[in-house]
Image (cartoon, helix red, strand yellow):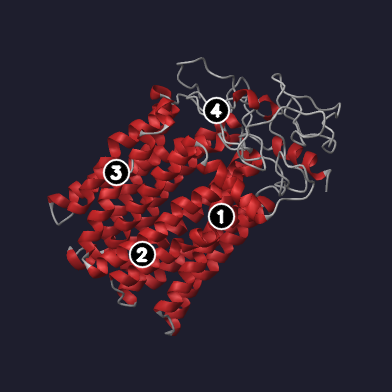
Amino acid sequence: MPTFLPASRRVRFSRRARLPHGAPSPWRAEDFRVLFSASVLSTLGTNVSYLAVPMVAVLALDAGPGRVGLLASLSTAAFLLIGLPAGAWVDRMRHRTVLIVADLLRAALLAWIPVAWWLGVLTFGGLCVVVFLSGVATVLFDVASQSVLPRLVEPAVLIPANSALVSLTAAGNVAGRGAGGALVQLLGAPLAVVCAAAGHLGSGLRLLRMARDDAHGAAPEPVATPPEAAETPDGTGLAAPGTAAGTAPEAPASHAGTGPERPAPPTGTAPEAPASHTGTDPKRSASPTGTAPEAPASPTGAAPGRLSGRAPGLRAQIAEGLRHVLGHAELRALALTGAVGNLGTVMVNTMLPVVFPRELGLSAGALGLFWAAGGIGLFLGARCARPLADRFGHGRGLVVVDLCLSPAGLLVPLMDRGAWLWAAGAGWVAFAMRTGAANVLGVSLRQRLTPGDLLGRMNATFRFLLTGSMAVAGALAGAIGAHCSPRTALWAGGALLGLSFLPVLFSPLRRRRELPTGEAPCGSAAPAPRENDAPKK
């Protein structure tokens, strides 16, 4: 459908956030408001189930540390099994449809738990199946939600948009997990899951109001870095995800048809004619440096740099995403730091539903408050992300917050009744602040470093590494807790939290002051800041 892409881009641009006098805001974009309000409901449902489902296993099914660890592992195992192909699948589908179906599926699965409990047929095996299938839906939802965001807002407001969503996640941690603890105490764990199902159902219905203009295979506008900006401020070159070999950056436009098939027009608007296979289409022009800029994906879904009109195979698409993330020093450092942090976080969280009621003699409400305190830290960190970027620079700010706050995670395993519980809570809040700031800065950076038609695969690769580590962590914590003790598993998780800053500390991120800049579609990107200037948001 060669005429669909330009039309969809015109509709999509009209719904983007545009304010006069150079003051864009994500809140002016109707579709962003729809995504945000749906995320409110989905986040509440996710956080209620985060506490309620393990408590169902512990209180209703008398599960021990090993079984609780198995549940935690199954909840994220889907990211290891389908995380990478999910990115290629999402790149081929309409993101709106993926989001709606994933939310409705999670609602139906969670609703089965209280029904099965009421009928007296709830078993641990059935709970495992529900948790795993919910994880599959979460894979698709998370990849699609991060891939759709750059299509809804201007590049200049990616940081405020990501900050709003991370702040929402933090608020959901506070309200959802606190409410989850209260609901478990008031209604019992199985009935508390009903509220989680209702949240996902409401989110899916709300997403029906998102515009139907997100075509699969369409190139998102904000993130492609043009060839003249392909060299990063720290001297590391961008990976070349669109090439067949994945090694060369952007090749000069060739008159023999060997360059990228779809060079974008200088204005950044959608092309009105099919790409020329000779490289001599008079309607298209090369960049000022003579290199071919990033181009929108063709209606067939082919990536830039491919000489064939056929869409690449699934393995080739997955390989492009892996090369893009692992072949770029900054993205690789972000992935490693996030994976280590998630490994430690999930090891701690897996054991808390066992430690609180059985070792400390505390209620589910107390556990909900502990997790809610972490949500406050996440919120504060997200709100501090932009000031940190303004003060230290984008990459340097991320390194500073990691270096200063990650070691506080070593306080968490010290938890006990009395003052030590407060000390553990303070360490948990501090590490959550680090996570909130790092999420905003890191997600914004990787979105700007990624060409449009690789967004789904990039996000899937990150999700595979970050959430895959969570699956490993759940199984590891369960094994350590069962064969040693829950407290030993807490110490292992705390040690990983304290050391999670190392990958970014020894990466080029410590020299980056600003986001990659360059020519964005419709001329929406701000001019590149002068050297040594802090980024202007």
Q: Earlier in the sequence, mark 4 or mark 3?
A: 3
Q: From the image, tell me which residue sits under label 3.
A: 499
CA distance for labels 2 and 4: 38 Å
Q: Quadrant of residue 151?
A: top right
Alpha-carbon distance for marks 1 and 2? 21 Å
Image vertical order of residue 526 relative to residue 271, above or below: above
Percent x, y for residue 524? 64, 26
The residue under label 2 is which amino acid type?
Answer: Ala
Mark positioned earlier in the residue sequence (1 or 3): 1
- Label of residue 475 in the image: 2
Between 445 and 185, the one lying in front of the other is 445
At mark 3, the secondary structure is helix
Which sits earlier in the primary sequence, circle 1 or circle 4? 1
The residue at which mark 1 appears reads as 84
Q: CA distance from mark 4 to mark 3?
A: 28 Å
Figure label count: 4
Q: Nearer the viewer, mark 4 or mark 3?
A: 3
Q: Secondary structure at mark 4?
A: loop
